[in-house]
């Protein structure tokens, strides 16, 4: 069916919306609401009916429904004030009130089964918030003369699709829809028109006697611009051993590249015309500004994203991360109020989406501020379990492993972080983990050099102070230890230093006591 109303045309077969002849970018879920309202016109559609039809009866907040209807109104040129096409019946539901012309198509297009809703492939309950950018993962092309790896060409993209869905920062087009497009055989714009995907991942596998070559290409479907291209060469004897690492690496690269692309697009928008998703990325970019985060600017964008979509967990989690950074660089006074605020915001993010890796990570960090080492480790693990390719979570996991003495695991995890999204990790964080590894393995000469270098940095964070002081103290480098202590006294107030060293958490046996002893000896607590 084709539905024409106002200056819009909606094709229910291809699931495409055009306005003034121009393709309208929106999510399949928003289009599902439009289709249901058009089919049900002119009667009232209750919120319960919408939930049953669009969300399959899952628990959905009124705020989430309001956000989707607002997005639909924007897509078709309507507003909540005018309500010339979609009328809100307060407390009951919605009704399509515009005049509609319906055209019956002679032959339905059966090749593509357009999704009524984009669902996460993992089966986890999706966030009741705005839909992030969507991606379609296509089945990979295969050049295998011996026909040994036909299943691999389908299994690998399926595993990548599942890994992407766990990140919670992307909307993943369901496998049943995206796998109808053979890789490299259709243009990205066609994928966009058929599935509403913002990005597409295509792949080609070439196999010879001894090796497998995997070529991947990530494209933005609107511009058809390739934003990431990579080739992996694997020995055929090691395919199954390295497959999980390839999937994790690919998922991490895709998230990083799409996030960066979304940030660049958001920078081109006027500040008062940003969507909630664009506001989130503008805030996120400022949180990872080097050498220091720009927290005030980040908070403005993140608060704006929360106001536009109060049910979306990610802006709350990012705001908690901003509050955590404030605690790390807070130089004066009592940080108790900031610590409580960070904990409350992190708990709110978890309540909105308990499977979001960033929400779990910021709760872990918030708990570290009160010396809860067990809670820190539990939620770091939850973060990585939720998304094995989440670089920020893996960086903190590497530190947990180092503190637990699992040195080989820690080094491997750090190596994975470097291949995923190294730009997301503050350099001092990696240096701190390496310092802990050197302390644990008795490499005191190397640890001393690293600690001395860290102690002189202008961007020193307070959570690095304990390990640096411990290294200088254990190495009996009295001059460096005294100089570092004097610098801390100039940088942080006595109350702030006492509060920090009193709440230090360490998983290395006896280390907390050593740190406290060193801090007292140098007048830091």
Image (spheres, rainbow, N blue to C red):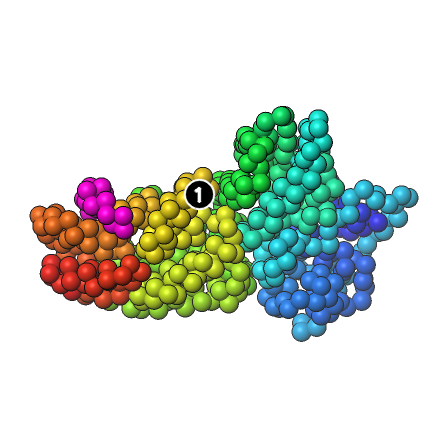
Depth check: give the residue in front, 149 or 177. Answer: 149
Please give left or right for residue 290 compared with residue 30 in the image. left
Q: Main secondary structure of the magenta part?
A: helix
Depth check: give the residue in front, 511 or 184. Answer: 511
In which quadrant of the rendered view does residue 196 lie? top right
The question of residue 329 being in magenta is answered with no
In which quadrant of the rendered view does residue 485 lie? bottom left
Please indicate, yes or no, whether residue 93 appears anywhere in the rendered image.
Answer: no
Please indicate, yes or no, whether residue 410 appears anywhere in the rendered image.
Answer: yes
Task: Please give the residue where the numbered disc 1 appears in the rendered image.
Answer: 416
Which residue in the rendered view is the most extreme toward the bottom? 91
Q: Residue at x 45, y 58 (%)?
A: 381
Q: Residue at x 27, y 61 (%)?
A: 509
Please give left or right for residue 354 compared with residue 392 in the image. right
Depth check: give the residue in front, 428 or 45. Answer: 428
Which residue in the rendered view is the most extreme toward the right? 106
* Secondary structure found at label 1: helix
The question of residue 445 being in magenta is answered with yes
Q: Residue at x 9, y 50 (%)?
A: 478
Depth check: give the residue in front, 436 or 130. Answer: 436
Q: Residues within 10 Å of mark 1 (few under 14, many from 20)?
A: many
The quadrant of the rendering that contains the C terminus is bottom left
Please give left or right for residue 46 compared with residue 290 in the image. right
Which residue in the rendered view is the most extreme toward the left? 479
Q: Residue at x 62, y 41 (%)?
A: 156
Magenta stretch bounds: 439-458
Please give left or right for residue 379 compared with residue 86 in the image. left
Where is residue 67 drawn, in percent x and y? 61, 60
From the viewer's perspective, is residue 492 above or below residue 15?
below
Where is residue 318 drawn, in percent x and y? 44, 56
Where is residue 208 drawn, in percent x and y? 63, 25
């Amino acid at each position: 069916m084709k539905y024409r109303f106002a200056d819009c045309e909606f094709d229910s077969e291809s699931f495409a919306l055009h306005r003034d002849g121009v393709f309208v970018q929106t999510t399949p879920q928003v289009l599902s609401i439009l289709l249901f309202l058009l089919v049900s016109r002119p009667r009232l559609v209750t919120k319960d009916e919408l939930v049953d039809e669009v969300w399959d009866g899952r628990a959905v907040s009124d705020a989430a429904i309001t956000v989707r209807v607002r997005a639909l109104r924007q897509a078709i040129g309507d507003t909540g004030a005018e309500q010339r096409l979609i009328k809100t019946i307060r407390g009951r539901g919605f009704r399509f009130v515009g005049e509609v012309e319906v055209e019956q198509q002679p032959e339905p297009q059966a090749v593509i089964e357009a999704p009524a809703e984009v669902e996460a492939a993992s089966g986890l309950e999706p966030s009741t918030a705005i839909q992030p950018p969507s991606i379609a993962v296509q089945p990979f092309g295969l050049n295998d003369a011996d026909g040994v790896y036909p299943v691999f060409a389908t299994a690998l993209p399926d595993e990548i699709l599942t890994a992407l869905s766990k990140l919670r920062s992307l909307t993943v087009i369901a496998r049943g829809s995206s796998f109808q497009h053979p890789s490299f055989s259709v243009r990205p714009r066609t994928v966009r028109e058929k599935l509403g995907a913002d990005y597409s991942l295509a792949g080609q596998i070439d196999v010879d006697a001894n090796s497998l070559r995997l070529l991947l290409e990530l494209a933005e479907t609107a511009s058809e611009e390739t934003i990431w291209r990579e080739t992996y060469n694997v020995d055929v004897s090691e395919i199954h051993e390295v497959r999980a690492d390839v999937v994790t690496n690919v998922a991490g690269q895709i998230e990083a590249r799409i996030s960066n692309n979304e940030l660049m697009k958001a920078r081109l928008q006027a500040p008062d015309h940003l969507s909630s998703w664009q506001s989130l990325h503008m805030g996120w970019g400022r949180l990872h500004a080097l050498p220091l985060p720009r927290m005030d600017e980040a908070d403005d964008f993140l608060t704006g994203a929360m106001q536009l979509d109060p049910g979306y967990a990610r802006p709350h989690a990012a705001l908690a991360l901003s509050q955590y950074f404030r605690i790390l660089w807070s130089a004066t006074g009592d940080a108790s109020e900031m610590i409580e605020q960070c904990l409350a915001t992190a708990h709110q993010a978890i309540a909105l989406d308990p499977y979001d890796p960033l929400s779990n990570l910021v709760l872990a960090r918030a708990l570290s501020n009160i010396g809860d080492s067990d809670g820190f480790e539990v939620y770091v693990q939850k973060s990585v379990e939720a998304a094995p390719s989440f670089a920020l979570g893996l960086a903190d996991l590497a530190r947990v492993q180092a503190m637990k003495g699992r040195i080989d695991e820690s080094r491997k995890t750090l190596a994975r972080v470097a291949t995923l999204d190294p730009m997301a990790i503050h350099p001092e964080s990696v240096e701190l983990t390496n310092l802990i590894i050197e302390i644990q393995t008795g490499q005191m000469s190397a640890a001393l050099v690293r600690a001395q270098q860290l102690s002189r940095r202008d961007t020193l964070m307070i959570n690095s102070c304990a390990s640096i002081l411990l290294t200088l103290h254990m190495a009996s480098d009295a001059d460096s230890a005294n100089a570092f202590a004097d610098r801390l006294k100039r940088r942080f107030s006595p109350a702030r230093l006492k509060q920090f060293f009193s709440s230090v958490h360490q998983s290395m046996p006896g280390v907390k006591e050593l740190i406290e002893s060193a801090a007292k000896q140098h007048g830091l607590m």
